[in-house]
Image (spheres, rainbow, N blue to C red):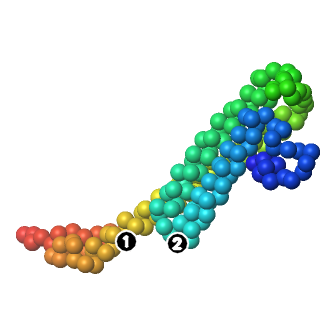
Amino acid sequence: MVVGIIFLLSDKKDIALSSLPHDIRAGLVVLLVIFILVVIVSLLGLIGTTKRNRKLVRIYSWMVWIITIIQIAGEVFLIYTLFIRKCHDEVIDGLEFQCISVPVAAKVVLLVVSLVLLAIQIYVAVVIRSYDKQLQDEEQLHREYIAYNTGAFNLNSVEVANEGVYTKIPNQDYDF
């Protein structure tokens, strides 16, 4: 992605953006837009985490999961490209592209590194979702605390200790 951005911003005369095929130019622009969206959403996630804003954290969590799903699709395409697709030369818009064969050891290393990065991405997505759930639980606990302290519960109740946890039970008259 960074290579695409550097290429788009490059001022070298021998590498002109207009000399590339249209689909490659469109792909670079799409990558640039996606990269900018990821940066914006990451900033929202950072702000949401520091401010403990559950809405921003949830947006960030959803975006990370979407990116993870896209990355899984990319991994499937990588496996297809490295191990299944046959290599052949192509001519697109008058430009000749030569197929370069990649050694098997390099394919395996690339695949292993990609899968490790995917595992890290999935782990990060799970951690972010867990943090969102933690914020949700804290908000629920805060609402219950406010309701308890404002008298929303029955005032004729008695607190009973049950293994260190206090619960409210109704105060009833029992005949002994």
Tell me the quadrant of the picture where the C terminus can be found: bottom left
What amino acid is found at the position of numbered circle 2 in the picture? Lys
Find numbered disc 1 in the image and state the secondary structure of the residue it sits on: helix
State the CA–CA distance, disc 2 to disc 1: 16 Å
Residue 165 is left or right of residue 82, and the answer is: left
Residue 151 is left or right of residue 50, and the answer is: left
Q: Which residue is mark 2?
A: 51
Q: Position of residue 43 (x, y in %)?
A: 61, 63
Residue 108 is left or right of residue 140, and the answer is: right
Q: Residue at x 59, y 51 (%)?
A: 64
Q: Residue at x 80, y 54 (%)?
A: 9
Q: Position of residue 86 (x, y in %)?
A: 81, 21
Q: Residue at x 33, y 73 (%)?
A: 145
What amino acid is found at the position of numbered circle 1 in the picture? His
Q: Which residue is mark 1?
A: 142
Which label number is shown at residue 78? none
Q: Is residue 99 visible?
A: no
Q: Position of residue 72 (x, y in %)?
A: 65, 39
